[in-house]
Image (spheres, rainbow, N blue to C red):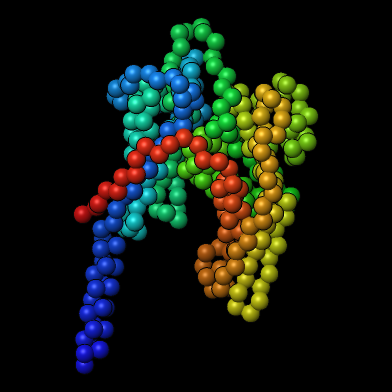
Amino acid sequence: MKLRHLSGAFAAVAYALLLQLLAGGCTFTKMQITRADETRVLPPTSVDTVKLYKLGDPAPQPYQVLGAVNARKRTSSLVTKVPTETQIFSALKKQAAGLGADAIVGTYTTFEAYYHGRIGSALAVKFLPLGAQASRDTNSFMVAILPLVNHDAKDSFMSHEDDSVVCTTMQQYLTDRGYYAPIVGGKMPVSSIEALSSLDSASLEQVGGVEMRNVMLLVLEKTAGASLVLVSGSSCLLNSWIYSKNLRKILWDKPVIGSFAQGWIVTAMEGGTRRKALITAAKYLAESLPKRGSVVKLVPKQHK
């Protein structure tokens, strides 16, 4: 009887905790700044005066990059609303104001499905007088992610899916590590690091955008899948390089193998192990790069 009573009490506690997780939950906010020049300190500006320009929107005048501002919001409850872009924008502008910025440019956000959250990044900038020469920054924390070069896809749909998985995962992890890492859309102009290195100066300047001095090339060499009884798995070989356009040299390169295996029923429900293997490979690559910047704060906000 005593054991049965304890079992019932444990079930009640577990049920209460489950209800709290589903109905309550917290939103965790992480903000970080990567300064372009640690020695340059400007007086802060008002967050209300900081202008916002999304990725692809032209700024009205030349500017000097003060640094990258990153923000991530995650929730601990499946029923808590996903953080909005507006919330991310607000966090980015607040950090930029602390740097003394007039605006944030190249702003992007992306949804983190696994964490039920959202992450975003932007460049905090100080406007220069009209007609002044725009700055060409060579900061190593600014890396444009080029479209995936896929040597393994069997059709255009698979190629598109692989590109979305690898580039988005890479962007999320790089942003979380203090990088400003916009994804470049369109068709990949080259298919190898050798081809990228051999481009003439004018063509190389356009790769990844004129402002971005460093680009990341990702090449999916091959994938493999296998099934054994009730378990299926996949593995992939992903090569990567970070290339400096102004120095015309490779700053970093690394091949990595990603793999994932799970029960075949779960595999069918979650869309296969190929996607998980690609995510794992991209995560390993991002985590092998050094962290940038400093965390401003980690704020949990309780939802009632």
The image quadrant that residue 129 belongs to is top left
Residue 58, relative to residue 114: is it above or below? above
Percent coordinates x, y for residue 39 in the rendering:
45, 21
Residue 244, relative to residue 131: is it above or below? below
The image quadrant that residue 207 belongs to is top right
Q: Residue at x 46, y 25 (%)?
A: 38
The foreground one among 226 and 101 is 101
Percent coordinates x, y for residue 303 in the rendering:
24, 52
Q: Which part of the image, by quadrant, shows the N terminus? A: bottom left
Q: Which part of the image, by quadrant, shows the C terminus? A: bottom left
The foreground one among 247 and 187 is 247
- Asked whether the viewer can see residue 164, the reply is no
Percent coordinates x, y for residue 241 in the rendering:
68, 40
Q: Residue at x 45, y 56 (%)?
A: 114
The foreground one among 128 and 227 is 128
Percent coordinates x, y for residue 76 in the rendering:
34, 56
252 lies left or right of 52: right
The foreground one among 17 and 199 is 17
